Amino acid sequence: MNLCAYGWRKIFCFCNIPIEIGERKKLVKNTSMTWHLGHSFSNQVKSASLFMTLWVTWPNFVSGEFTFRLEGVKTHAMSKKTRHMSYSKVKFDDLENIMAICENLRTFLPSQVLSWSRCLNDEALSGLLSKLTSLRELSLSNCRNLTVILDAIGNLIHLRYLDLSSTSISKLPDSVGSLNNLQTLLLTNCSYLTELPFNLERLTNLRCLDISGTKLSQTPQHMGRLKNLQILTVFVQGNRCGSSIKELKELQFVRKKLTISNLQHVASPQDAMMANLVGKEKLNELVLKWNGTANNSEEVRSVLPHLQPPKALRKLTIKGYGSTSFPDWLGGCQFLNLASLCIDDCTTCVLLPPLGQLPSLKALSLTRLSLVVSIGDSFYYIPSDQVEPSRRNAVRPFRSLQTLRFENMPQWQVWLPFTVIDENADGAFPCLQQLYIKNCPKLKGLPKKLPFLAKRVISKCEQLVATVPPTIWELQLKDCKKVSMKELPPRLLDFSIGGYDSFELPFGVADNRNCSIEKLSITSCQVIRQLPQIGLANTLKSLNVANCGIFELPMNQYFSTLERLCIKFSFGSLKSLILSFFPKPSHLDLEGCQNLESLSTSGDHL
């Protein structure tokens, strides 16, 4: 397509509809413009880095009398030449003028991402749909008063872009199926939406269907007929009726993120295999969800092996899978680009796959694995019956991992370190920086060789015995009384502690002259009496103490760097607070200090 021949004027008018940057970017991501202008146009514009410049940064005056912004103060009157309109504040008389004057309106969009009007309700929409039959782009996003979409929407036969995100609709009329030119349908966060039209299959030009944040129990039958679909955020497997996962076979161009839920209703492994997920090479993120109580039946176990993702996948989530172990494709080196993996609520799982072999994995989250007792060699490498023992050290396990999270694993007791044949060989987790362990009450120990660990969060791990490495700069300890420190790590900047019963903080020595802590939070330590006497006063910028009844603030120290002081239901014996000890406070919050009688500066009461 010749770019000049298409007509720059139409492009400028559409690109310069007076809406804010956020709404423009939403249109850039989901609009039908790039699709209905054709691929050759898109390639020419993208190669010149021109499309985003036109859409986001060109001033509104380029569009002249063809565009209009409907607000409280009008800069110029609407006219019959108006083709593109944005709105923020709409009154009833405005709607009457629009329907009377702008019969040839092509675009009706909010001027701000969160703008909406109380006047845009069910009654007002009925009038708009009956008059503005030439619309190409219509957005009613965030119109909370909108609960019903009438059949009259089927009269908008030219409509290409329809955004009903964050409205209160519970269903769409079947007349939506007659919008043959529709290319983008956005229903994001329609939290009352429970069903889609049965004839959605007729929208054969549809490129984008966003139904994330809805309450659909199933997607309609014959979704496979939407062969031009490129964005499908959620696919809900039907139970005996509705669409089957095998319909995904025909959706060859699906890209970006796809969530498949209700996988417990998949009828057979053959249906899962027919979905051909491994062939959808443009998918970046995949979420596989089994809903309800985990079921370790043969039918459930046989589904996931046939849902192998494409090798270029970057992010994978598996939730609610009901088997004791995972298929062979999860682990190993075949997913070279997989950077994020989440395994959640797989309550019958007892054995983790060899995730240490994923070469690009940067973030790993393992949560609600109720039956996992031990994590050992199989977590780091492929079992020895599948690979020679001499090759185990050829690749460092978790070589790229930066963030590791374990949560809600009530039976987990043992975390074995990576065992190497050669003592001089490198260990696992060479790049690990952040470690989160929460609600693992039976866990007893941690691997010691974590050379670059900078942040550690441990909560409700009552049996965990561990020391804090010197590399830590952020540390959170809550209800884990057996975790101790001989002294404060020299790099520690941010320290939060809660649920300790001892009479001193777990410092080992009170005199921490090399202390570098800038932010300190102490909560629910009822018998802790005081801060260390030396060190903290010279570095501390923020101090938060809550629910520490007998805690005492040393009033013979000069906190020269403290900027934020928050005391809640603590310092039971404190009667007077001398502010001159805190010369730089920008925030002071005192609550529940029942015995506090006065604030003073240099002894002068306030």
Image: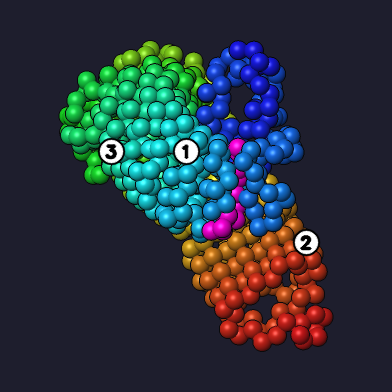
Residue beneath the point at 77% across and 86% down:
605
- SS under mark 1: loop
- SS under mark 3: loop
| Residue 122 or residue 527, whichever sits in front | 122
Residue located beneath label 3 in the image: 218
Residue located beneath label 2 in the image: 561
Q: Is residue 89 magenta?
A: yes
| Residue 557: x %, y % from top left | 76, 70
Give the class, few, some or many, for how many residues have Cα within 10 Å of label 2's Cα (few <14, many ≥20): some
Figure quadrant of the C terminus: bottom right
Residue 396 relative to residue 76: left or right = left
User: Which contiguous range is marked in magenta?
Assistant: 83-94
Residue beneath the point at 52% across and 23% down:
35
Residue located beneath label 1 in the image: 133
Residue beneath the point at 49% across and 54% down:
120
Residue 510 seen by the camera: yes
Q: Is residue 480 magenta?
A: no
| Residue 464: x %, y % from top left | 43, 49
Foreground mark, 1 or 3, reads 1
| Residue 301: x %, y % from top left | 23, 29
Residue 296 seen by the camera: no
Residue 354 relative to residue 197: left or right = right
Disc 1 to disc 3: CB gap under 8 Å = no
The CA span between labels 1 and 2 is 66 Å
The CA span between labels 3 and 2 is 58 Å
